[in-house]
Image (cartoon, rainbow, N blue to C red):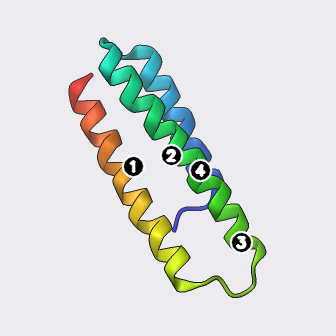
């Protein structure tokens, strides 16, 4: 799982790319990706506070992170 700082870095990178995007659709996708990275950052911070995180929560964060990675890759190809 990514750390809170890694997730926030990815969110800021999505924001940066959104400003450079050529189309509104790409800007919107990148804004959604940034939002999802920020949600993942919050979850990573919550899990770090717990001494024994639950496996289903960790798995859902990993899956969501993979989805955001996929979105980011698609957006980079479009822009």
Q: Residue 10 versus residue 53: which sits nearer the camera?
A: 53
Q: Which residue is mark 2?
A: 36
Percent across and percent down for residue 57 are: 54, 75
Assign a secondary structure to mark 4.
helix
Residue depicted at x 32% and y 23%: 26
Residue depicted at x 53% and y 47%: 37
Specify the quadrant that holds the C terminus.
top left
Residue depicted at x 58% and y 43%: 9
Percent across and percent down for residue 11 are: 54, 39
Label 1, label 2: how far apart the Cα atoms are: 7 Å
Q: Which residue is mark 4?
A: 39
Q: Is residue 8 above or below residue 32?
A: below
Of the residues under marks 1 and 2, which one precedes in the sequence?
2
Q: Dot 3, crowdedness within 10 Å: few (<14), some or many (≥20)?
A: few
Instruction: Kindly check if marks 3 and 1 are in contact, taking CB atoms under 8 A apart as contact.
Output: no
Of the residues under marks 4 and 1, which one precedes in the sequence?
4
Image side of residue 12 versus residue 32, left or right: right
Say how many tags the image has.
Answer: 4
Assign a secondary structure to mark 1.
helix
Image side of residue 77 versus residue 19, left or right: left
Instruction: Kindly check if marks 1 and 2 are in contact, taking CB atoms under 8 A apart as contact.
Output: yes
Q: Which mark is residue 68?
A: 1
Q: Dot 2, crowdedness within 10 Å: few (<14), some or many (≥20)?
A: some
Q: Dot 4, crowdedness within 10 Å: few (<14), some or many (≥20)?
A: some
Label 3, label 2: how far apart the Cα atoms are: 18 Å
Of the residues under marks 3 and 1, which one precedes in the sequence?
3
Which residue, as the protein is rendered here, is positioned at the far left? 77
Of the residues under marks 3 and 2, which one precedes in the sequence?
2
Q: Is residue 73 above or below residue 45?
A: above
Label 3, label 4: how far apart the Cα atoms are: 14 Å
Label 3, label 1: how far apart the Cα atoms are: 21 Å
Q: Which residue is mark 3?
A: 48
């Amino acid at each position: 799982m990514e750390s809170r700082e890694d997730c926030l870095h990815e969110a800021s990178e999505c924001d940066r790319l959104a400003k450079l995007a050529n189309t509104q659709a790409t800007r919107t996708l990148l804004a959604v990706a940034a939002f999802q990275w920020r949600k993942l950052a919050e979850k990573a911070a919550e899990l770090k506070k717990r001494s024994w995180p639950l496996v289903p929560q960790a798995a859902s964060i990993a899956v969501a992170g993979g989805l955001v990675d996929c979105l980011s890759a698609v957006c980079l190809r479009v822009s």
